[in-house]
Image: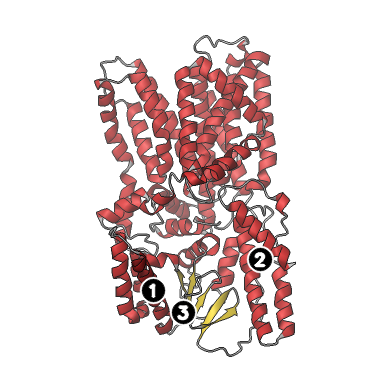
């Protein structure tokens, strides 16, 4: 390959540009869904939800020690740097691919301009930046989640794999020693799995190219055996999970201190039902393909279509390799039934970037180096301009604002029962565990009480709940039958539900602490108690006496980008709480007060019209439509 130092300098510049963009658009607090929990776990060295993300937890905690200021800001800076590093590695990967395949099989071009010192690294960097400035890739660098580290590990694993195969191809067919390149690849692959299990998406393409290079023979099996030690070494961060679980940190999801719990956590056992759900393929893949042209600003997609044809002409085997990367990603991500599916298409985005690079190379071959580089840079500039507002999270404080607005006004030692993990519950975990904000309040996820491990943790933190121990034991015994796979009749299901509600309501009745529920919680929770709208929750009171309330001003600021179903859900959450209070005031003939709360409910309207809503993944458009219709009725 051409001057290695030149390629490295261009890759470094690519990483710096991407990291700068991510730093400019990063969130300055925690975001929706898992962000608050992940940040809290990294801050206190806890164990977050499966698959535990041990490598990220270790790196995140180190970042909080090295970067001054709030832990969440340090963690978001880390995410931006990881995404930037990933773009830099992607530029190196693309340079390597271009140097290997662009001129093979008769591909020596019509123009020599691409083969000067700057042509190849600049075209590779342009394609890498084009992929890195898609909303799928750029977005992962704006907040602390596992996907930012995934953005670094994916291109790094592919690069070390290709380096390994190159060494294999140069070796004698009878030689199968474990080389430095083999150690680098196998160790990196193991590390990648300790961050995100979707690394498995790479397997079909890797296996194809490996056996295409080595052949189906005993030597191939010996080479695979030689990769095992490095791979196992890369998996060592997984020891973090049982070690930290045994220390019982405040965040200790699943308490993975036994082999069975550890394996369940490691494999994401509780999420298996969401995988390979072909009923969601239309919506997930429909979103991906409908947004693909704009993701690559049309020019990039046109280049990719040209590039993939060119690649197959130059190297059939590598064309198949990239196609397997793309199709494996679509199969896995397109059938994964979660709302926040965008980052799962990162492998497909990287692959389209490879194809676009070959398209740029062909432009350079036909019209000269500057034409290819110039078209690539133009595409990157357009992507930066068009996508900046879509990924910008620098003004989005909605989750922290909502979490504080809910828990800060609650009385001392209050209990709050909720299900809204996505818009504030995970955020309260960061505030309480990382910063000590209202740590006296017990925020309990009602849905998670069905999990015996979570229930036991709640009982340990709130020993007064054990006053209804008989009800708890009865529920737990019934739950064990379900967990052990025993056949459930309709009668069993009815009994299970009865025991669950009986246990929760018994806790509410006996705990002698002020107890609140949010509006979406099942109405059977707190059955028999009066539910009085108090702020953003309902206070459970024994009588129906009118409770006067001084209106509280909420810190509420809509972000510039409002085309997000979680933004809409948050706005609806506020407005419904105000409407509940308006209805309560009207019930007691407090007309002026009722009108005040009714008018205030309207102030949370994000003022989004249905025609403004872009294509969204599974179910998200429905949530947007419901929110829009809610505020239209309110107006």
Which image quadrant for residue 127? top right
Instruction: Measure the C-alpha gap from mark 1 to mark 2.
Output: 39 Å
Residue under numbered circle 2: 556
Which image quadrant for residue 231? top left
Q: Tell me whether circle 3 and circle 1 mark residues in contact (CB < 8 Å).
A: no
Q: Judging from the image, what secondary structure is the residue with disc 3 in?
A: loop
Horizontal side of residue 417 vs 460, given as left or right: right
Instruction: Measure the C-alpha gap from mark 2 to mark 3.
Output: 25 Å
Q: Nearer the viewer, residue 538 or 118?
A: 538
Q: Earlier in the sequence, mark 2 or mark 3?
A: 3
Q: How does the figure colour the protein chain or chains?
A: secondary structure
Horizontal side of residue 347 vs 228, given as left or right: right
Let me know if residue 333 appears in the view: yes
Number of marks in picture: 3
Residue under numbered circle 1: 498
Q: Earlier in the sequence, mark 1 or mark 2?
A: 1
Instruction: Measure the C-alpha gap from mark 3 to mark 1.
Output: 28 Å
Please rate how many residues cluster around mark 3, counting C-alpha atoms within 10 Å: few if below 14, some from 14 to 19, many from 20. Answer: some
Q: Earlier in the sequence, mark 3 or mark 1?
A: 3
Residue under numbered circle 3: 413
- What is the x, y in percent for residue 615? 64, 45
- What is the x, y in percent for residue 535? 60, 76
Residue 50 lies, with reference to residue 463, above or below; the image says above
- What is the x, y in percent for residue 489? 33, 63
Q: Judging from the image, what secondary structure is the residue with disc 1 in?
A: helix
């Amino acid at each position: 390959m051409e001057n290695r130092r030149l390629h490295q300098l261009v890759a470094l510049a690519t990483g710096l540009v991407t990291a700068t963009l991510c730093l400019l658009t990063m969130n300055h607090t925690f975001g929706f869904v898992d962000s608050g929990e992940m940040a809290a776990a990294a801050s206190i060295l806890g164990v977050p939800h499966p698959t535990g993300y041990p490598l990220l937890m270790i790196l995140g905690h180190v970042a909080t020690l090295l970067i001054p200021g709030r832990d969440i800001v340090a963690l978001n800076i880390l995410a931006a740097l990881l995404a930037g590093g990933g773009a830099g590695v992607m530029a190196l990967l693309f340079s390597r691919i271009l140097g290997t395949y662009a001129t093979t099989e008769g591909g020596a071009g019509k123009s020599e301009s691409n083969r000067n010192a700057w042509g190849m690294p600049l075209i590779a960097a342009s394609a890498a930046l084009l992929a890195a400035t898609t909303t799928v890739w750029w977005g992962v660098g704006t907040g602390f989640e596992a996907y930012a580290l995934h953005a670094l590990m994916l291109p790094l694993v592919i690069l070390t794999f290709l380096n390994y195969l190159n060494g294999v191809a140069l070796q004698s067919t009878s030689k199968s020693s474990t080389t430095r390149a083999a150690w680098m690849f196998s160790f990196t692959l193991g590390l990648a799995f300790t961050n995100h299990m979707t690394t498995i998406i790479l397997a079909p393409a890797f296996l194809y190219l490996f056996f295409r290079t080595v052949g189906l023979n005993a030597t191939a099996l010996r080479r695979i055996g030689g990769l095992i030690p490095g791979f196992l070494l890369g998996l060592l961060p997984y020891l973090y999970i049982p070690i930290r679980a045994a220390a019982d940190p405040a965040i200790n999801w699943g308490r993975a201190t036994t082999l069975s719990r550890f394996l369940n956590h490691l494999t994401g056992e509780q999420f298996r039902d969401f995988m390979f759900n072909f009923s969601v393929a239309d919506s997930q893949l429909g979103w991906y393909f409908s947004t693909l042209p704009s993701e690559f600003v049309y020019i990039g997609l046109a280049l990719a279509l040209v590039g993939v044809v060119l690649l197959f002409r130059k190297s059939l085997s590598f064309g198949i390799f990239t196609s397997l990367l793309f199709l494996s990603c679509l199969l896995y991500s397109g059938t994964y039934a979660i709302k926040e599916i965008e980052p799962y298409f990162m492998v497909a985005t990287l692959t389209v970037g490879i194809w676009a690079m070959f398209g740029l190379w062909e432009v350079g071959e036909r019209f000269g180096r500057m034409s290819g580089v110039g078209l690539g840079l133009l595409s990157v500039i357009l992507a930066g301009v068009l996508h900046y507002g879509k990924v910008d999270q620098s003004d989005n404080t909605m989750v922290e604002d909502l979490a504080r607005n809910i828990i800060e006004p609650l009385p001392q030692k209050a209990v709050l029962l909720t299900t809204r993990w996505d818009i504030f519950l995970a955020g309260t975990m960061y505030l309480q565990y990382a910063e000590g904000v209202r740590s006296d309040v017990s925020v309990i996820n009602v849905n998670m009480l069905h999990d015996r491990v979570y229930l036991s943790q709640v009982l340990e933190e709130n020993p007064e709940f054990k006053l209804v121990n008989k009800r708890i034991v009865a529920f737990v015994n019934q739950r064990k039958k379900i967990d052990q796979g025993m056949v459930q009749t309709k009668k069993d299901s009815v009994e299970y539900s009865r025991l669950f509600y009986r246990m929760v309501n018994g806790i509410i009745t006996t705990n002698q602490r002020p107890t609140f529920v949010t509006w979406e919680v099942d109405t059977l929770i707190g059955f028999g108690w009066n539910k009085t709208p108090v702020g953003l929750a309902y206070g459970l009171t024994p009588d129906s006496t009118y409770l006067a309330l001084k209106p509280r001003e909420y810190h509420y600021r809509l972000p510039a980008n409002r085309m997000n179903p979680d933004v809409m859900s948050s706005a609806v959450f506020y407005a419904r709480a105000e409407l509940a209070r308006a209805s309560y005031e009207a019930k007691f003939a407090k007309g002026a007060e009722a009108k005040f709360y009714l008018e205030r409910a309207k102030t949370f309207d994000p003022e989004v019209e249905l025609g403004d809503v872009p294509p969204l993944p599974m179910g998200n458009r429905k949530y947007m439509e419901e929110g829009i219709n809610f505020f239209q009725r309110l107006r």
